Every structure is written in structure tokens, then in C-alpha cells.
Image (tube, grey):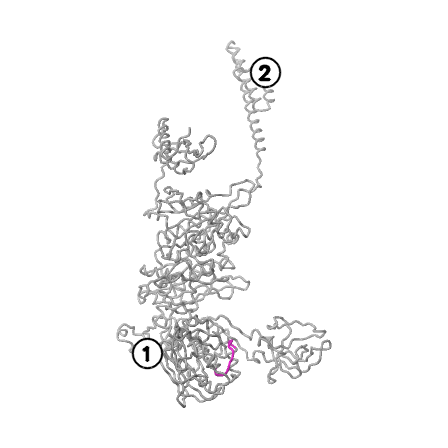
Amino acid sequence: MTDLNTLESDVLAQVARAADLQALDAVRVAAVGKTGSISGLLKTLGAMSPEERKTQGAAINALRDKVADAIAAKKAWLEAAELDARLASETLDLSLPAPHRRKGSVHPTMQTMDEMIAIFAEMGFAVAEGPDIEDDFHNFTALNFPEKHPAREMHDTFFFNTKENGERMLLRTHTSPVQVRTMVSQKPPIRIIAPGRTYRVDNDATHTPVFHQVEGLVIDKGIHMGHLKWTLETFLARFFETDAVTTQFRPHHFPFTEPSAEMDVQCDRSGGEIKIGQGTSWLEILGCGMVHPNVLRACGIDPDEYQGFAFGMGVDRLGMLKYGMPDLRDMWSSDVRWLSHYGFSAFAAPNAASGLS
Amino acid sequence: MKFTLSWLKDHLETTATVPEIVAAMTMAGLEVEHVTDPATKLAPFTVCKIVEAARHPNADRLQVCQVDTVDGRKEIVCGAPNARPGLTTIYAPIGAYVPGLDVTLVEKPVRGVVSNGMLCSAAELEYATESDGIMELPDALPVGTSAVDALGLEAVIDFEVTPNRPDWLGVVGIARDLAAAGVGKLKDVSIAPIAGTFQSPITVTVDGEACPAFAGRYIRGVKNGPSPKWLADRLTAIGLRPINALVDVTNLISYDRARPLHVYDAAKLSGTVISTRLGRHGVNGDEHLIALDGKTYELTPEMSVIADASGERPIGLGGVMGGESTGCSDETVDVFVESAWFDPIRTAQTGRATGIASDAQYRFARTVDTGSLVDGIELATKLILELCGGEPSEVLFVGEVLPAPKPILFDPAYVGQLSGLEIEPQKSLKILTDLGFKLDAPKDVSPTEFATHAESAVCVTPPTFRRDVEGKADLVEEVARIAGYGALPSTPLPEVARAVGGILTAKQARARTARRALAAAGYAEAVTFSFTHHETAALFGGGQPELLLANPIASELDCMRPSLLPNLIDAAGRNARQGFPDAALFEIGPTFHGERPSDQRTVVAAILAPKAPRGWDKAAQGDVFTVKADLLALLEELGAPVASLQTARSASSWWHPGRSARLQLGPKAVMAEFGEIHPAVLKAMDVAGPVYGFEITLEAIPEPKKKAIKTRPAFSPSALMPLTRDFAFLVEKAKPAGDLVKAAAGADKVLITAARVFDVYEGPGVPVGFKSVAIEVVVQPREATLTDADIEALSAKVVAAAEKAGGKLRS
């Protein structure tokens, strides 16, 4: 028994002394390996009497289990210590910046256009498109601009060179030619908006030679100016995302509508910036009216059967008003600082559920 | 168009204030642009009298005045030499803003004497541009009278006249609309004829083209000279310069009645016939006229010319400006008055050709009232006789004016039908009569119209000054704007069925997706002009003559853009010059390849000029493969058949020839191009490289197939593990690795699900002129686990396919 006790304390001391996994394994092999000291004792059991084997066997097996447990515990401890040491050496300075990633953005004019389309889609309007390079018929004649009339001069049209046949193409001065193309190719009822680029020979703080318009056209039986007013009031309240938009209709003249109107929105201009939905000033915001019977006739629609309204508004300008961008020309400058300042997130796609922007 | 309140009150009986009139004008469609109201500007200034004036103790040129003012007796220091006891002048109290000096008066000593206000000159009140001393006013003016009243100043209203309303170019026209709108009562504006006592010694001939109609009158024995104060003031108030009574009368009537007139000094006329004709060009040499503005104008056959001396000597540009040679002066004794009618288009063109924008030209270009020829003469006669005396001849009238406007059959119920306004028929008809329209029973219309009209219909005849009114919709506008647009109802649009699949076309929806996808990928959206310089356009395959603008806004913007890339590259260059060289930009918009509608494309383009700030991690900046990855991800997002796309080497000339490619479904179905921009193109555009980019033509992406139902094929993953096998092939250096990958992937269409390049190597162990391309092939067993023999057979297939594509298995 004394031998076993000595062996036990001896082996356990060796386990305690083992400084690393390799040393511990050597202890394990020396004690419980094939030729280990404890394994050797177990082999002696076969030569013992049953009586002796009973007592000695239990003692030797208990010793073996005790040693195995000690080794396993020490191994776990050593492994944990080793991992701690490795992790300590792997420390990173996480205050260092992550790799550079460019931040993209959606241009405010296009965001505004998407917002307008989203609102009109809710109201049952489809989106129609047409070419930027137009002919005289679609841009003027069909829209009841008399030949050489001063109203044509007021449009500051960009022209291409006169062709051999005397015809001269032009850049559309409004998206109304899309209305003409729609009325010529579709039968009423018609309910469309026509977004797109438009062009006028004009360049200052409030005009750029290229700008964006959204025009609308509704043709049906019994459509009157009250429908026009509701449509625009509803649109503006939704667009400016406020309940407090006050608007007024004011008579105006356009060759292609009769009666014609301009719509003003109430605003506050006192602080140098324009705030919609407050104040007592009026700001002209769009032109509109009932489609002129001559326009309907030019497009093959009987004005005694159908009537309807049209409106047109400047997208760039509405965007400026809503988002407080001071200069129209900046919108075309592609300045990366401006784009990042006024641009919109890719995920700000306007929709009825989460709002416009 | 400018006018004053007192002028308006000549024709309108009203107690309305300027703000009330401005509001009524705006709501009737006369858009007021500007009101200059001296009553606001000069509110603090009043009449005062100098009681005493003594020399300033410390300054020779200054006087210390005791002044009776609205605020009592005040001591005021004044430097004007004309300050003297008894003078009636204008006083400004401390705190007043003096517009001519742009200062606000503060109480401070002037050379030791406190001045309790200021005595003002005409210039300090902005009543005159310069002045000599303080104002000298009539002694009858009591102290405390406002400066505005003392000087007879009043508000000037300036408003925009829309081209349809030439009648608003006369104050009477404004008064008529305001009266209809309920602002007051229109006074009698009719003009009584004055009988002539002799036959005009001057006769007139017209040629219908140059001048359709001409009324004239000879007035003999006039005494011309400066106009009386009321007339001079009236013209000055709206910015006109008084000249002499005869000329001022014509200007007055031009603004009062929108009726331009002209006066000839009869003594300066050569011969006894005034004729109107078109200009001559090249017949007797070039024809010229020295006009009243002293400038010489070349006359062309497109212009109306007034001539004397048997038609040989031009003495005026019809409807535009008279000639210097026959103008009226203070010496004029006999005057011939012209009241003619000139064609609007011809007058407009003459105005543009000569650059003359006279009041007459402006009015004739917008159509002068054809009913005003004789009235104009009569009103001029009345005023000339009043101001200059004289004896009038009989009125002569030659030619023919346009026929009067035709009656319009009009059912007042149509007002409600078109405008939605609820308005009594009688009220509608009253508005029309107030505006000068004539109402008749419909029996006067033709039998065919009579047969179809409603019982309540009437015949409405527009006055000759309202040729813009041509149909019943125009009449609705008249009623609605006078009744007030404020009364329009707000009526919800009838509900319509919404399109089930959304309202956007596939192209519109793709543009929208592309916008959001590229912004999410780190590109900033730019919006640039549709123009570029024709030389830049030529670099990008454009610049065709039919795409050059005849009237560009600037010479560098003279051509429609053939591509979005030049504007984006330009923007990158501009940003770099401002110190922000790292640019990732995109634009979605039109490009132009011809003048027909089908020649316009919708293009998505992006550029990457990778110049990000240095990073500690030394991460790659991005290169041509970055844009390739972004392009393919975007095409996938847009629903393009990415798996079927071929990568062809031959991209357009503006790309780096060795670092660009096109993605196509076939040689004639090019969907996109990408690569590095050609260094020579960047150099020509003065932009530092490298710049990478891509351009997608949305029209080239096939329309997605319309599916009746949205369900997707069932998900059936294989239960068997996929396995991979690696191969390395030697292939000629110039051979695209893509071909090899495609061959390997296609070796067994059932089992091979992917083939990926994981290494490309050149160097020791690889023959010169060759590269080693290592490919990992992914094999997906279908029915059962593959045996070694199966895998062997599959590998052999891959090797054979690669060999066909020019690749030799590396051993």
C-alpha cells in the first residue's frame, strides 16, 4: 500500500509540475502509457491470488482514475492559459479606420421627380414619355400657338439648323408635345403625367437652359376646373408633406389652355429663405388650365364630347423649394460636395408607406 | 405696362386704394409685377416754411434756420445757398430715411450746432436726378402738407400684359376689366367726333400688304410747344419723356387707348400724297430711313414703309417709328395725324430686324383694336385743339380693316360644365356685357347652328379689341376670371382602376432601379446638360450636323451629347481642379444619335476616377474590374440575361483599346460597354486619368417576359454534396480567359454548375507568350454520389473542352 501511496503522490506532483502540454503528455505516458508505472502495476494483477487481486485491483484502478483525472484537469488548465496568451498577442487597434467605402447618393432633382411620380401614381396617373428633339407641330402648332405669334417668341426656343426641305427641328420647350403624342395615339379617358427634360435659351440664377418638367393631362367626359384644382391642391399638400399648404388660382394666359390659371402657394419669405405652409406671401408655382378646344381638335378629340385639364410644373424648382437649395445652377454643377450635401440615400425611394423622403 | 392711380381714375369711378386695385388686378389676370409708391417712400417728408436764416457761427457756408414744421418750430442747419426766410420747402424729421442720400437722419451737431431735421432738395427725395439747392415750393402750400401731395406724386403700377390682351396696353382697357370685377364703375369712354371744316390737302394711298387701313386728318394753324404740366407729369410718371404737345398727345393716347398715332409736320412733307408700301431692296439701291431716334435703318421688302414724294422718299417705318425728316417740332404750324393699322406679324418681324422696341411697335405687334382708327383721330383732334388750337380737316379713311369678330353661340350653362363654377346665367351674361361683349338672341346665327343650340343659348359678339376670344371656352374664361377663381370648387377626380402591375414601363422602372442600385453601390448621381461641345461629341462618336444647335447658349454647349460619359468625365475634371479628385459619378438620361424620336436612347452611365485618400490598410483603390463588378451587379438587378452575355473585345474608340469590352447578346445587340477611358480622350478633355466607366443602353436590355402569375419554380436543393476539382491550363497570353472558363463550364451542362478562375500566372515554368489559368470546377452530383471513374470521365471532358478553346492541361 505504501508503494501505491508513494506512486500516487509522486505522479500527482509530476502533473502539478508539468509546465506545458508537452511535459504533461510525458507525465501521462510515464504513468498510464503502455509501459507506464501504473499500467505496469495493472499488469501484475494477473499473477495475484483472487483475494489479493480484489483488494489490490481496486486500489490500482482507483489510482489510475485519480491520475487520469488530474492529467485531464491540468490539460484543460494549460490549454486555457495557452489560448489566453495567444489572444493577448493577437490584439488589434480597432480605433484604426475601416477600409474606405464611397457613399453614393440620388440627385435631389431625380428624388423630387420620383416623389412626384409616386404621388401621381397613387392618383391613377400613368407616365408618358416622348423625345427631347421635337418638330414644330408637336411643340407649337398642335398646342394652338399661331404661326409667328409673340407667344412663340416668349418660349426662347433652341433650334437646329434648317433642313433642305425648310423644316427646322427644335428642343422641346415644355413636355406638352408628349401630351399631344398621347392624345393622338390614345383614346380618352386619358390620365397621364409627362416628366422629362425641357429646354429654353435662358441662363441666370433662376433659369438654366435645361430643366425638368412634370406635366399632367386628364381627358374624359365631364372633367372640369374643379377637378384640376383638387388634383393640384392634393398634390401640393402631399408633395410638401404638410397639411397647411394654402394655394390660390390666378387667371393667366397660355395658348394651349382655356381657361388658364397659375397656381400660387402661400409662403414666408421673411428670413431670406422660402418656407412653404407659413407666412403671407404668394409664390407662383405652376401653370395650368382646361385643354384648349383647338388642341383637342388638333389631336383628333371632339371638344364637345370630351374635355379635360393640363398642368405643368418645374421639377428642379419644386425640389429647390422643398429642400431649400438656393441656386438652380448648382443642381447642374456635379460638384461632389454639393451632391453629397443635398443628395438622398439610395434607400429613400418614395412610397406611400414610409413617406416621400 | 405702367399707369398711375389718377390716370385710372380718369376712366374708373372708384374709391379703391392702390393695394386693393393691385389685388383685384391680380385676381382678374393682370399680373402686377411692381408697384412704386412714393407715398411709402416719402411718408415722413412734409412741407415747411423758413422763418429765419442766420449764418452759422462756425461755418461760412452754413446757415442756421428757424423753420415752421409739422412738429412745430425747429432749428435746422442747412448748407443750401437758396435757404432764405419765407421759403416754402420740404422738411425731414430726425429718424427719416432720405432715399436720395441713402441715410437715416440722426440728431447730431453740425459744426457745434444741433440740427433738428433736414431741409431737402429734389434729388434727396429722388424727385429729380440732380438739383441745385433745396426745393422751392409755392407759398400757398400749408405747413404739414405731405411731400407726395405737394409734389403731385402718386403710385405707379407696373404689370405683365399677356400676349392675348393688347387692350390692357391702354388704361381704358384696365379700367374696363376692373369695373367688371366690381372695383368701380367705368366712366363714359366714348369719343365724340369733331366736324372737319375743309378737305385734307394731303391724301393717302394704301397697299393692303404694307398697311391695310389708314385714317388721317390735317390740322392747320396749330401752335406747338411744351405740354402743359398735367400732361408732362402724366407721361413722366410712367417713365416717358415729354417732347412737345403734338407728340405728347400721341404718346398719351397710346397709353390711354392702346392706340398708337403718328404726327407729321405737313410743311416738311414732299408732295401731297402719303403712300404706304413695302420696303424696296436692290431696286433703286438699298433703301434707308433716318428714324426719330436719329439712327439709320435699312428697309427691306418685309417692312411697311410710309413714303412721300410720289412714294420715293421713306418718311416712316409703318407701325414702328416715324422718320426724322418729317417730325413735329415747336415750329410746326400744320400737322397731319396718322391713325393706321399694321399687321402684327409684320410689325413683330420689323421690330426684331431693326431692334426697335417702341410703344407703337409693341402695340401693333400684339394687334391694335381695328375699331380705334377713327376714334384715335378724333381723340387726338380734341386734345390738339385744346392744347395747340388749329382747325381740323375732314377725316380721311382709306383701306379696309379686318372684319369684326364673329358672334359665338353660347349657352351660359357651359360655364358650369367647363369650370365647375356655380353661377347664375344672368350673372355670366352681365360679366360679358361689362367687358364690352354684345349679346343677341340666337336667331341671328346661321340656321345650322340654330338647329342645335340649347334654349338658353345666346349669341355673344366680342368687341373689336377682343380678337383673342374665338369660342365658348374663351367666354368661360372671361366669366370665371371676373367671377373669381377663388369660387372654383375643389372636386375629387373620379376613381379609376389602377394598373395592376404599376404604372411604369419596363424602361422607366429599370431607370428607377438603376438609380437606387448605383447610389447603393457608392456612386453619386449627377444631372448634367444634354449638350456638349461638338469636338467633345466627336470624341464620343457624335457631332453629326443635324445635332448641332443653331442658337446654342454658349459655344462650348453647341451639340447634343452622344454619350453621358463626356459630361461625367468633365465633372470629374472640374471636381479634381477644386481639390476633390476622387469621383464616382453616374447619370441616367438621354443621349442623341439623330433627330428622329427613335434616335434618342436612355442611357445609364457611371465613371470611377479612383483617387481615394491613402489608407493604412493599403486597400486597392478600385480599377476596371471594380466597374465590371458594379456593371454586372447592376445588369443582374435590371433583369438583363447576364448569363447569356458575351464579352467582346471591340469596344468603341473612346475606350482604352486593351482595357475595354462590350457586353452583348450578339454583335448587333450591344447592351453595355465598359473599361478604362482612352488616355488620349482624357488628354483632349484635360482630365487626369485613369478614369474607368461603363455605359448601358436601357433600350438594348430585352423586355422582361410578362408572366400571368408571379409564382416561382419550386426550390429543390440536391441532397448530395457538391465537390470541386482544380485544373490549370496553358493558354496563349492574348487569349481571353473567359473563353476557357466558358468551355470548362460547358463541358457537362448537367453536372458542372460553375467554373471559376482562381489564379492567372505568367513566369518561370510557363513558356514565353503563354499564361497559366487555374480553374476551379464545381460539380453537383444529381442522382447518386460520383465514383472515381465518373469523376475521371468528367475531368477528361473538361480537359477536352478546354483544349478546343486553346488550353492545354498543365502537367
Q: Is residue B287 left or right of residue B152?
A: left
Examine the residues drawn in magenta and state their main secondary structure: loop
Tag shown at residue A234: none
Q: Position of residue B400 (x, y in %)?
A: 35, 79
Q: Position of residue B623 (x, y in %)?
A: 48, 43
Q: Position of residue B142 (x, y in %)?
A: 60, 83
Q: Mark 1 belongs to which subunit?
A: B
What secondary structure is found at the residue carrying circle 2?
A: helix
Is there a contact, CB below 8 Å, between mark 2 and mark 1? no
The span picked out in magenta is B237-246
Q: Is residue B152 above or below residue B546?
A: below
Name the amino acid type tagged 1: Asp
Task: Quadrant for residue A5, please give it.
Answer: top right
Name the residue rendered at 46%, 43% in the picture.
Answer: B624
Task: Quadrant for residue A217, please give it.
Answer: bottom left
Q: Is residue B278 visible?
A: yes
Neighbours of disc 1 within 10 Å: few (<14), some (14-19), many (20+): some
What secondary structure is found at the residue carrying circle 1?
A: strand
Q: Is residue B374 left or right of residue B234?
A: left
Residue corresponding to mark 1: B440
- Looking at the picture, tell me which residue is in the foreground, B340 or A288: B340
Q: Mark 2 belongs to which subunit?
A: A
Q: Is residue A123 above or below residue B177?
A: above
Q: Position of residue A92 (x, y in %)?
A: 57, 37
- Looking at the picture, tell me which residue is in the foreground, B363 or B656: B656
Q: Is residue B184 magenta?
A: no
Q: Is residue B238 magenta?
A: yes
Residue corresponding to mark 2: A7
Task: Quadrant for residue B116, please give it.
Answer: bottom right
The residues bearing labels 2 and 1 have C-alpha atoms spaced at a distance of 137 Å
Neighbours of disc 2 within 10 Å: few (<14), some (14-19), many (20+): some
